[in-house]
Image (cartoon, coloured by chain):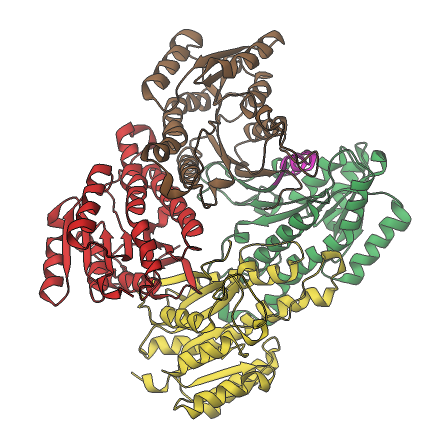
Chain colours: A yellow, B red, C brown, D green
Amino acid sequence: MSTKKAIAVIAGVGPGTGSSIARKFAQHYPVIVLARNPSNYAEVVQTINSSGGQAIGLSTDLSDSTSVSSTFKKITTELFPDSPIAAAVFNSGGGFVRKPFLELTESEFAAGWEGQVKGAFLFAQATLPLLLKGVEEKVEFPPSLIFTGATASIRGSANFSVFASAKFGLRALSQSLAREFGPKGVHVSHVIVDGVIDIPRTKEWKFEHEDAKISPDAIADSYWFLHTQPRTTFAYELDLRPYVEKW
Amino acid sequence: MSTKKAIAVIAGVGPGTGSSIARKFAQHYPVIVLARNPSNYAEVVQTINSSGGQAIGLSTDLSDSTSVSSTFKKITTELFPDSPIAAAVFNSGGGFVRKPFLELTESEFAAGWEGQVKGAFLFAQATLPLLLKGVEEKVEFPPSLIFTGATASIRGSANFSVFASAKFGLRALSQSLAREFGPKGVHVSHVIVDGVIDIPRTKEWKFEHEDAKISPDAIADSYWFLHTQPRTTFAYELDLRPYVEKW
Amino acid sequence: MSTKKAIAVIAGVGPGTGSSIARKFAQHYPVIVLARNPSNYAEVVQTINSSGGQAIGLSTDLSDSTSVSSTFKKITTELFPDSPIAAAVFNSGGGFVRKPFLELTESEFAAGWEGQVKGAFLFAQATLPLLLKGVEEKVEFPPSLIFTGATASIRGSANFSVFASAKFGLRALSQSLAREFGPKGVHVSHVIVDGVIDIPRTKEWKFEHEDAKISPDAIADSYWFLHTQPRTTFAYELDLRPYVEKW
Amino acid sequence: MSTKKAIAVIAGVGPGTGSSIARKFAQHYPVIVLARNPSNYAEVVQTINSSGGQAIGLSTDLSDSTSVSSTFKKITTELFPDSPIAAAVFNSGGGFVRKPFLELTESEFAAGWEGQVKGAFLFAQATLPLLLKGVEEKVEFPPSLIFTGATASIRGSANFSVFASAKFGLRALSQSLAREFGPKGVHVSHVIVDGVIDIPRTKEWKFEHEDAKISPDAIADSYWFLHTQPRTTFAYELDLRPYVEKW
């Protein structure tokens, strides 16, 4: 047992869901948070560290293999040598373009895939060996690899070809990994977030009901729930939406 | 607020999942457990009552409207008058026949629907008014109506026409109710249990891995997790399976 | 080879899709058309017979096993003794109630299942032995059993619990039969009709585009297409909708 | 009306499905066939031209925007100036790697997306303006854009992360396009080919039943069927498999 050393790695941390997930997992593990821009994780890192947890932010471009491998080299040689990963969360957000198909440029289209699918590929390749190490070392909960999906993960729509093709691809990757690494003891799962999340960026969006936005802290609770399931009883997929959402 | 009086009703309680769910919810609510045969719930009722909880078993044929309405009349007039329902779980099991299609009798085929779909219809009609009462009275957690599904809820198979057509029907019902009663504040959800559950009946079933069966207590934890989600962040569907399950 | 004797049986024939399907298959086979009320099939029977085809209408309550077996006894002993069935189409329509869940009566709810699922069960049990006879006798095209679905076959909605639970159940049945009888050479398929069909009953329904309704003749062409696929290349499911339909 | 000038463009033509599709559509239209390697289309071009049809092969790397635009410049300025496209088929095959996830290189993973999703993006951007021109000019059948999918389009599996993430992405793209361009009169559809196709490469693969492989000519018939559907009655998706296939 080496539970104390096991860490959590949260990729795609901004001032919304990623921060909530980091705070939640920091109640139990040292957390590494990754984002391209340090301004995205600075606040949550400080909040966690000043409230008795341990958080380290590492500036990382998840779609760039050099950047990802440099980040994980730092984790495994400097920061937490010999630590297994207890939980790895891929929560990379958007920057995706929503426009009529014939107006898309090739690079706008490619950006969706790079951010979501290639990023998830690189993140999974970096974390899975350390998650498997967690299985070997019998860490407290089944090591977990969780991917954040969206409505567009299961439905293509007009003007959403960039996001939908990326999110479908991400879901296929997560499903393939669940079927390959589940039997090895890693809990791979996929969460479909269907609705507007209540984050700073959406603060001004008003709806008929004041509680019509998804709570990022409740999303984090769901991720923690998935993480703590025993391996006899893994959930692969979960869909989250506000009670008033049409679906 | 009338939280103390809110009750949980678990339909389809035998010596497996239903009992685990009853024990879990009994940590928070008085529970009513329903099964046709009192021998199915006698043990769990005693366990709960002797460990500080409150449980009452009511012999009920869920597919018989007279039996269901007599049970709920007893609940609302004698046992817990004025109590809202905090959680209602439809966990009605099997008794379904698995055989070549051309060998099925009409009554064997109908039995699947009666037990699963008609039973769920009657249970939902009896519990929803009391769940809505829970919304009005602002009970602690969003009142929840949870249905137990199976692999056959999303996949028809050779020799499984009875079970699959019943379980598909049940899922359609739960989805229709989620879309009708979610906006009214009731959390309707559907759990797909995909694999062999570790219950007395399956004790002798041996697999390559000793932890290859789903834990009924972990299923119960999932139902409790669904029940405690805030209404900003409802999950509709969850699929549970052992880590070694092929799917 | 006994191609000449092979017949088609179309269940659920009214002045819309069923009639179109009957006319289409009557170009190749003698057709039997079934409906509860003879007024539903009288016109199409006359049209087919007066234009060189052969059609016979038999008044049948598809949800009543006595009525169904009496119909098939008539077919196999009087009308077409020794004939295999080349194509059997279950196109039973509606009569389903659309209303708030708590206002439904038990018999309104049951009627959906009786008409769709029990009806399909009885029809499949009556036709499959004759479809298998078609396989044995190597009729021209793979004997086909086709079920008509709807949007509600894959999506439950508020106020649609009757129809959705019935149509999900029908789809499960068709999928189970496809997996059981496909390997025996019978082509079982399921067609999701998603949109308003252009039939007498919807004549007055106006849309922004004048060709916004599904053509029943084009539906019939799709059924014929499915019927003529070789068994190396069976389609199980097809979704049909007007080009302007939101989905 | 300019029906005579309308052309078909088939992308991804090798000695299997692509050739069958080209031959089928060549019975009605001049066809352009695209493949990276001219040896892939040489035979079908000759077969079509020598049997009274008109076929032109253009060597094209579908994942390279320069190559795609040079091909379509040639089509629109030299070969068929002013012609609308009646049917465009994206049938790009494989070259995908199937191996344990942790053994995949970044470029092996990217190749799946490049060949399937980026290729389909470039092909759709090149053909949609000419398909819309077909709508305007009221060509005989609704202009059609058809994508070839696979089992992996709807199911991720161990060792299939490359193919599944690419095929899911392709399906998302096709679904987004169907919802954007359907209402403009273009019939976008997606065909899931589930099973082994009977092509030269699989000639030696033996199964228990001799007709256990999908016929490429029957696939082509299905594409033609989709193409000829009227716009009141578009199918979006079709799944094709041999009668003995387990699914």
Q: Residue at x 51, y 61 (%)?
A: A194
How many numbered marks appear?
0
B143 or A236: which is nearer to us? B143
- Quarter of the image that includes the N terminus of chain D: top right
Q: Quadrant of residue A221?
A: bottom left
Residue C209 vertical placement versus C127 (above, below): below
D79 or A55: which is nearer to us? A55
**Picture coordinates of residue C241 (x, y %)?**
61, 38
Residue C31 can be seen in this image:
no
Residue B7 vertical placement versus C86 (above, below): below
Residue A16 vertical placement versus B56 (above, below): below
**Picture coordinates of residue D156 (x, y %)?**
49, 57
| Segment colored magenta | D220-235
Q: Quadrant of residue B235?
A: bottom left
C167 or B89: which is nearer to us? B89
On screen, residue C73 versus residue B52, left or right, reads right
**Picture coordinates of residue C203 (x, y %)?**
62, 27
On screen, residue D186 versus residue A87, left or right, reads right
**Picture coordinates of residue B5 (x, y %)?**
22, 62
Residue B200 vertical placement versus A132 (above, below): above
Residue C118 can be seen in this image:
yes
Q: Residue at x 52, y 21 (%)?
A: C14
Residue C45 on the magenta span: no
On screen, residue D232 versus residue B236, left or right, reads right
Residue D222 on the magenta span: yes
- Quarter of the image that includes the C terminus of chain D: top left
